[in-house]
Image: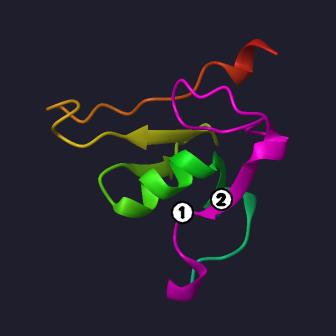
Amino acid sequence: MRDKGCAFPGCDRPPRWCHGHHILSWADGGPTTLDNSVMLCGYHHRLIHRGHWTVRIAADGMPEFIPPAYVDLERRPRRNTYHQRE
């Protein structure tokens, strides 16, 4: 399993507390594939759907999150490193 829990930066929620999220919505033609999905806990799933943060899959196949300008003016991508320790 790639994400090993909520993929949002800093979140420690385990997989059983997470939902699959389509990066490009299936309603907009997005496929149901690992390359178009990320695991998110309920809180971060709702946060992503509000539209301020965005998520993408980086060239190395790992999810990264782009914060809104009010969090980081340069909008530098962030990753969850918590689950990498496991």
Q: Which residue is at the front of the view, 62 or 39?
A: 39
- C-alpha distance separating marks 2 and 1: 5 Å
Q: Which residue is at the front of the view, 12 or 61?
A: 12
- Residue denoted by label 2: 37
Amino acid carrying label 2: it is Ser
Write the residue at 31% across / 39% down. 67
Q: Is residue 5 magenta?
A: yes
| Secondary structure mainly formed by the magenta segment | loop
Q: Earlier in the sequence, mark 2 or mark 1?
A: 1
* Quadrant assignment, res 31: bottom right
Q: Is residue 65 above or below residue 82?
A: below
Write the residue at 64% across / 42% down. 61
The circle drawn on residue 79 is none
Residues at marks 2 and 1 touching, judged by CB atoms closer than 8 Å: yes
Q: Is residue 78 above or below residue 3?
A: above
Read off the magenta span.
1-28
The circle drawn on residue 23 is 1
